[in-house]
């Protein structure tokens, strides 16, 4: 009997005819993991049966419910909103009030160089009558910037009497609760003393961009729910630490968006060997205010501790479900390969020339996991059992078999073949016949329940943490959600589809392998007839494409039906349905690539823009940029010839800059100029920056076609200072077209549009006039097609020849504010500078094609959007016409193009269109074109589907 060890003749098999069937050799990792899973399974089974399994399912169910609550329920511990803060400010008398809050911080270093801070807080507390709560609470931080603060030496006195303190410890804070034993009213003195460790941390200085050891602390702690009428903070540090300060310390008091601060100077009464800094605020602070001091030290001044264990929990805890899923995925692979592997048959098998009894070709295909040739085997069986009395029926079956042979193994047949393989009844039939088994036990339960529960938990954690401050260095919520989902799907697929062979199934498989050996040795496919009962089994497991060609050649001589009739019979049979030809595959791949390509493009490529973005120097995003204003400006540009008919534009800017010290970072000078015009690089560099005659530290960066300069002053400056900036453009001319004429244009932008906003306006003290000068060779000025100031309303263009006879002329412009101290509207609507148009070819090195390419590149996404929307409209029209005919279109590339490319092109058009419209000005007609194309595409697609629903036959 097939599938049993009692097959006839096995004992008489000659050893030479045996074919070894060695056990699969698994990797050591799979072997170890699988052995561990088997031990866990045995251990759990020894501890309980169905009750324990039910309990574990309930446990995973609770995890899943918790994930759902985190995902759709309320946010846990949400950050306080502005409404929350204002509501609590209005309820300030519901708790005691700090008439004064005096905080004294004494900072020292231990023998290892780590920071130790002794804190004394003296609070004059006023208790209103009839308070509901008579306890006093103070919250101290226990974790800060990844460091454990380890609060110690905590003592509390009330009116000079030491109090018992109840300590309620949480993950990152310690709540101190004092119960005085009576209802307090009126004024009382509360003194809290404690010690904190490692308050400093390594950070990047926003002013210089260099690392610093930063001591930045909020004296109110994590959450002070009381109002404070007066604040007095004093910080004392050792002299050796003070010597390593990068700049003055800074103290501030803030509440929501309201705040004030000041730079601190050493106190005259500082103890010997120490330096004290202090700041005081008489302004009342509502609950949840922040009172901070910041002291940046040179790197290496303070020894930093290792990261605390809570930091690692906070960092990797949110992704723990994903990590467990990743480990589960690894274990599932090991289980599928070893623990849930196929059972072993005999250590050998022999060639077989009889079909297995009770096993159909379809079942054999499932045993051998051969979906590509399953249909071919099925069709060959049908053709083999057809008799000669029903010739027409046999011819139809032969044609079906020939079609299956031609499709076998082809890419276009893989989806259809796999679908027939997965949906066939033989999958369940193998289990019923005992050929395969469904793994059961605790491990399989884990592989089914854990992915669902942990994925929901991961989604919920990501949703909750999206409302909190990011603590981890790497926080990619979408990636974590996607990875956890993918891991869960794979693990579930392995657990639910694992169907290892039983010993009975393994013996059948060896029998089928024996048929394959017999077919290879006897060249069965070359000599067999279609009535050979072994032929359907011989094609299973063999290379499908080559086997299909051999079988097709075998069938061809027996088909006597005319070609046209055979084709009709093949279509009527329906076996060709679902087969994808090369063009049909290409259409579907193109549809997917269009959508994926559009999504990748908008995330990788720079945003297209026909209009200049707001200069970064005006946005206020650069630290310290809003603390400087230009009080005076003397800007000189000189255009000279270089070797090879090139040109050079040298600019010297002499600025009177007013520095303010009213910010938490030092004031910085920030300037910005065009560096790329119409796709052509101007070769702009900053040569030197000085302040009051001394070299100033600075850095430059390029973005969006501009060069940005910012100083990196580490110290605090105030008042008016002389700043000189020298720049050079080695390729100042660009090829462009003006009124239909090609020119080489030199454009000097002294001040970008919006410059007047960076100049102070004061009616009583108006700014000084700005002076601009532009010097060039007379030869260039005489040959100019056009020249003048920009904007043209700024002033008349009157170059004056140099008195030294150097053959050069200088044009000057003096801008003065009006009587109210305002700048004229005529000079505020554009970049301020000079434009000089020279005949094309005057300056070497210009690129006439760059401008056209730059504009084409900027317009390309919009034009592509319109084109894709047009294709979507065309596909919708064609689909609507086909629907109106009430005839189902024949399968083929044309039908697939309408069904697949129409929605794909529209989705791609929407993705690119939204991306494009973000960079188009509201009054630009090009934006109207893009938006109109999208709207037209949407209307066409909606109309198509509405008509299709209306035209659908009704029952």
Image: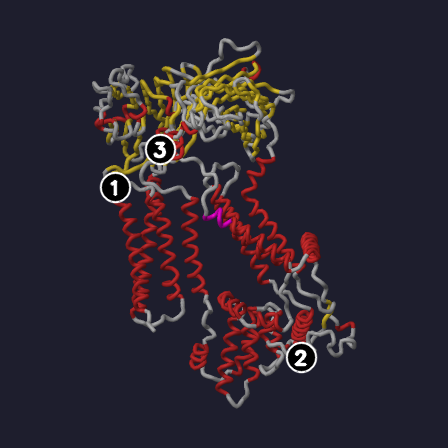
Residue drawn at 53 percent across, 82 percent down: 557
Taking 21 as reference, is 270 left or right? Answer: left
- What coloring was used for the rendering? secondary structure
Res 99 → quadrant: top left
Magenta highlight range: 67-72
**At which x and y percent is residue 850?**
35, 40
Does residue 951 appear in the picture of this structure? Answer: yes
Of helix, strand and loop, which one carries label 3? loop
Q: Which residue is mark 1?
A: 923
Is any part of residue 249 visible from this angle? no
Classify 546 as above or below 334: below
409 relative position to 43: left or right: left
| Nearest to N terminus: mark 1 or mark 3 | 3
Which residue does the image show at 36% across and 27% down from the upper left?
A: 648
Q: Is residue 494 above or below residue 798?
A: below
Between discs 3 and 2, the one toward the N terminus: 2
Closer to the N terminus: mark 2 or mark 1? 2
For label 2, the residue is: 354
For label 3, the crowd category at 10 Å Cα-Cα, with few meaning under 14, some 14 to 19 and many 20 or more, is some
Graded by Cα atoms within 10 Å as few (under 14), some (14 to 19) or many (20 or more), the crowding at tag 1 reads few
| Residue that carries the numbered disc 3 in the rendered image | 844
Which secondary structure dominates the residues rendered in magenta?
A: helix
Of labels 3 and 2, the one closer to you: 2
Q: Secondary structure at mark 2?
A: loop
């Amino acid at each position: 009997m097939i599938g049993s060890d009692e097959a006839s003749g096995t004992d008489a098999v000659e050893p030479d005819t045996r074919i070894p069937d060695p056990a699969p050799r698994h990797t050591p990792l799979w072997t170890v993991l699988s052995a561990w899973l088997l031990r866990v399974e045995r251990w759990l089974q020894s501890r309980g049966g169905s009750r324990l399994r039910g309990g574990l399912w309930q446990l995973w169910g609770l995890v899943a419910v918790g994930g759902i609550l985190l995902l759709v329920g309320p946010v846990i511990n949400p950050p306080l909103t502005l409404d929350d803060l204002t509501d609590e400010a209005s309820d300030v008398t519901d708790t005691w009030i700090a008439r004064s809050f005096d905080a004294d911080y004494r900072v020292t270093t231990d023998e290892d160089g780590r920071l130790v801070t002794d804190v004394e807080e003296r609070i004059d507390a006023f208790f209103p009558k009839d308070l509901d709560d008579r306890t006093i609470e103070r919250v101290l931080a226990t974790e800060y910037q990844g460091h454990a603060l380890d609060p110690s030496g905590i003592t509390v006195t009330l009116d000079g009497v030491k109090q018992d303190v109840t300590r309620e410890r949480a993950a990152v804070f310690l709540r101190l609760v004092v119960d005085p034993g009576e209802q307090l009213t009126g004024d009382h003195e509360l003194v809290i003393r404690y010690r904190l460790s490692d308050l400093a941390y390594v950070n990047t200085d926003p002013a210089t961009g260099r690392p610093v050891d930063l001591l930045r602390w909020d004296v109110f702690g994590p959450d002070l729910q009381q109002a404070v009428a007066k604040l007095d903070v004093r910080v004392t540090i050792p002299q050796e630490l003070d010597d390593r300060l990068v700049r003055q310390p800074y103290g501030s008091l803030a509440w929501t968006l309201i705040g004030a601060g000041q730079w601190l100077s050493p106190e005259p009464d500082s103890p010997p060997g120490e330096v004290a800094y202090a700041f005081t605020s008489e302004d009342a602070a509502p609950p949840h205010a922040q009172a901070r001091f910041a002291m940046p030290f040179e790197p290496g001044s303070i020894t930093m501790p290792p990261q605390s264990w809570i930091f690692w929990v906070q960092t990797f805890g949110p992704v723990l479900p994903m990590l467990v899923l990743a480990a589960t995925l690894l274990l599932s692979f090991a289980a599928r390969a070893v623990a849930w592997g196929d059972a072993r048959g005999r250590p050998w098998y022999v060639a077989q020339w009889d079909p297995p009894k009770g096993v159909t070709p379809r079942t054999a295909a499932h045993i051998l996991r051969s979906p590509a040739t399953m249909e071919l085997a099925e069709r060959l069986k049908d053709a083999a059992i057809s008799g000669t009395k029903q010739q027409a029926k046999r011819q139809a079956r032969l044609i079906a078999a020939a079609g299956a042979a031609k499709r076998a193994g082809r890419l276009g047949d893989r989806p259809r073949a796999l679908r027939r393989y997965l949906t066939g009844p033989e999958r369940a039939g193998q289990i019923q016949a005992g050929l395969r088994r469904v793994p059961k036990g605790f491990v399989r339960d884990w592989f089914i329940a854990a992915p669902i529960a942990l994925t929901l938990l991961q989604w919920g954690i990501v949703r909750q943490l999206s409302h909190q401050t990011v603590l981890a260095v790497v926080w990619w919520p979408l990636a974590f959600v996607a990875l956890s989902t993918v891991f869960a799907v794979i693990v579930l697929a392995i657990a639910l589809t694992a169907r290892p062979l039983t010993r009975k199934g393994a013996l059948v498989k060896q029998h089928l392998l024996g048929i394959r050996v017999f077919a290879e040795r006897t060249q069965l496919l070359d000599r067999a007839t279609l009535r050979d009962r072994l032929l359907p089994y011989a094609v299973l497991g063999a290379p499908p494409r080559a086997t299909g060609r051999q079988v097709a050649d075998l069938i061809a001589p027996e088909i006597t039906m005319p070609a046209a009739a055979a084709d009709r019979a093949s279509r009527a049979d329906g076996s060709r349905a679902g087969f994808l030809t090369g063009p049909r595959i290409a259409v579907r791949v193109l549809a997917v690539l269009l959508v994926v390509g559009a999504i990748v493009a908008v995330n990788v490529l720079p945003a297209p823009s026909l209009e200049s973005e707001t200069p970064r120097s005006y946005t206020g995003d650069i630290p310290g940029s809003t603390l400087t204003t230009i009080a005076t400006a003397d800007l000189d540009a000189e255009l000279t010839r270089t070797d090879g008919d090139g040109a050079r534009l040298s600019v010297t800017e002499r600025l009177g800059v007013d520095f303010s010290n009213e910010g938490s970072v030092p004031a910085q000078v920030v300037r910005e100029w065009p560096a790329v015009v119409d796709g052509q690089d101007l070769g702009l560099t900053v040569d030197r920056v000085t302040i009051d005659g001394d070299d100033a530290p600075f850095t430059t960066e390029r973005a969006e076609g501009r060069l940005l300069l910012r100083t990196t002053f580490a110290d605090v400056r105030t008042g008016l200072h002389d700043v000189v900036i020298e720049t050079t453009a080695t390729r100042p001319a660009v090829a462009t077209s003006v009124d239909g004429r090609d020119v080489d244009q030199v454009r000097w932008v002294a001040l970008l549009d919006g410059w007047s906003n960076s100049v102070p306006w004061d009616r009583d003290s108006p700014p000084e006039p700005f002076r601009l000068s532009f010097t060039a060779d007379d030869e260039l000025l005489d040959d100019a097609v056009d020249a003048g100031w920009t904007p043209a309303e700024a002033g008349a263009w009157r170059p004056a020849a140099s008195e030294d006879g150097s053959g050069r002329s200088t044009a000057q412009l003096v801008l003065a504010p009006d009587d109210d101290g305002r700048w004229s509207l005529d000079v505020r609507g554009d970049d301020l500078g000079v434009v000089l148009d020279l005949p094309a070819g005057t300056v070497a090195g210009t690129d006439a094609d760059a401008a056209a390419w730059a504009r084409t590149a900027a317009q390309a996404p919009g034009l592509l959007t319109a084109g894709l929307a047009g294709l979507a409209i065309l596909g919708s029209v064609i689909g609507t016409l086909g629907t109106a005919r009430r005839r189902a279109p024949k399968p083929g590339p044309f039908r697939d193009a309408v069904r697949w490319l129409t929605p794909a092109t529209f989705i791609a058009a929407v993705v690119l269109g939204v991306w494009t419209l973000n960079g188009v000005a509201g009054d630009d007609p090009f934006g109207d074109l893009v938006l109109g194309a999208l709207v037209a595409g949407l209307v066409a697609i909606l109309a198509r589907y509405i008509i299709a629903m209306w035209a659908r036959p009704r029952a």
